[in-house]
Image (spheres, grey):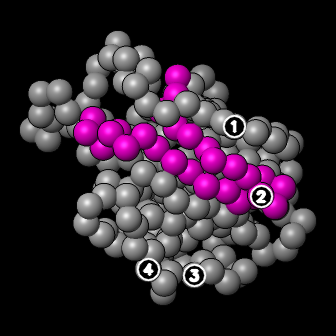
């Protein structure tokens, strides 16, 4: 199962104070329509992310985002149109502040200057697949946001599994949308990573 949807916003709004002015960003649920209840309409599991874009992209699928959708194919995230910046904090563009509830909730944090290099950023999550479906989610972040919370929900507790991998994605520019220097060349990503925050990651894999 692979689905794209617009993320659904919760009624509450979080006002971030990471900059001199205040910026409003939404708490969203992916898949759309979950709305914070334990009755996600299209699957047994869904994710909540704060300081996400509203409206914004919500992608979800069964299986790992690194795995091809067909044997010998490209990774699922590439097929879906995303470009990998970092996975699990190596070389250090992504920081996870901590986990709770058996690695089914936690916080995310990015370096303050990362938005100088990208126009769009997305968080990707892969959870153990022993409990339910979908296994993986990608949620678009609000422009300029550098930290927030995430939580995994399920229609029943036995469908919850801990976080296995966390990703940071962007989308490659196409044609006239590309500006010189808008997306760093692959060779410059190591330099970018060296200037950004490191990772403290307690990994908990489930099968």
Q: Give the numbered dot on residue 35.
A: 3
Q: Position of residue 175 (x, y in %)?
A: 14, 35
**Residue occupying image coordinates x 32% and y 47%:** 120
Residue 12 seen in the figure: yes
Give the residues in magenta.
91-118
Q: Earlier in the sequence, mark 1 or mark 4?
A: 4
Secondary element at tag 4 = strand
Given contact means CB atoms under 8 Å apart, are the residues at marks 1 and 2 in contact?
A: no
Q: Which residue carries the number 2 mark?
A: 100
**Residue occupying image coordinates x 12% and y 27%:** 180
Residue furthest to the top in view is 187
Distance between the alpha carbons at the discs numbered 1 and 2: 12 Å
- Badge 2: few (under 14), some or many (20 or more) residues near its Cα, within 10 Å? few
Q: Earlier in the sequence, mark 3 or mark 1?
A: 3
Distance between the alpha carbons at the discs numbered 3 and 1: 29 Å
Distance between the alpha carbons at the discs numbered 3 and 2: 22 Å
Q: Which residue carries the number 1 mark?
A: 201
Residue 104 in magenta?
A: yes
């Amino acid at each position: 199962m692979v689905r794209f949807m617009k993320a659904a916003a919760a009624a509450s709004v979080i006002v971030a104070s990471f900059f001199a002015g205040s910026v409003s960003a939404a708490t969203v649920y992916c898949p759309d329509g979950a709305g914070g209840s334990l009755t996600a309409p299209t699957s047994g599991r869904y994710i909540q992310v704060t300081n996400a874009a509203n409206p914004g992209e919500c992608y979800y699928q069964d299986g790992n985002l690194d795995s091809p959708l067909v044997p010998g194919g490209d990774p699922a995230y590439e097929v879906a149109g995303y470009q990998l910046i970092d996975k699990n904090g190596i070389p250090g563009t992504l920081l996870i502040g901590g986990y709770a509830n058996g690695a089914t909730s936690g916080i995310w944090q990015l370096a303050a200057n990362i938005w100088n290099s990208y126009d769009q950023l997305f968080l990707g999550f892969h959870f153990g697949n022993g409990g339910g479906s979908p296994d993986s989610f990608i949620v678009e972040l609000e422009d300029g946001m550098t930290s927030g919370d995430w939580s995994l929900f399920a229609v029943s507790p036995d469908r919850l599994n801990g976080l296995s991998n966390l990703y940071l994605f962007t989308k490659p520019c196409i044609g006239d949308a590309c500006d010189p220097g808008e997306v760093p060349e692959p060779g410059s990503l190591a330099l970018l990573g060296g200037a950004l925050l490191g990772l403290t990651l307690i990994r908990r894999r489930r099968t």
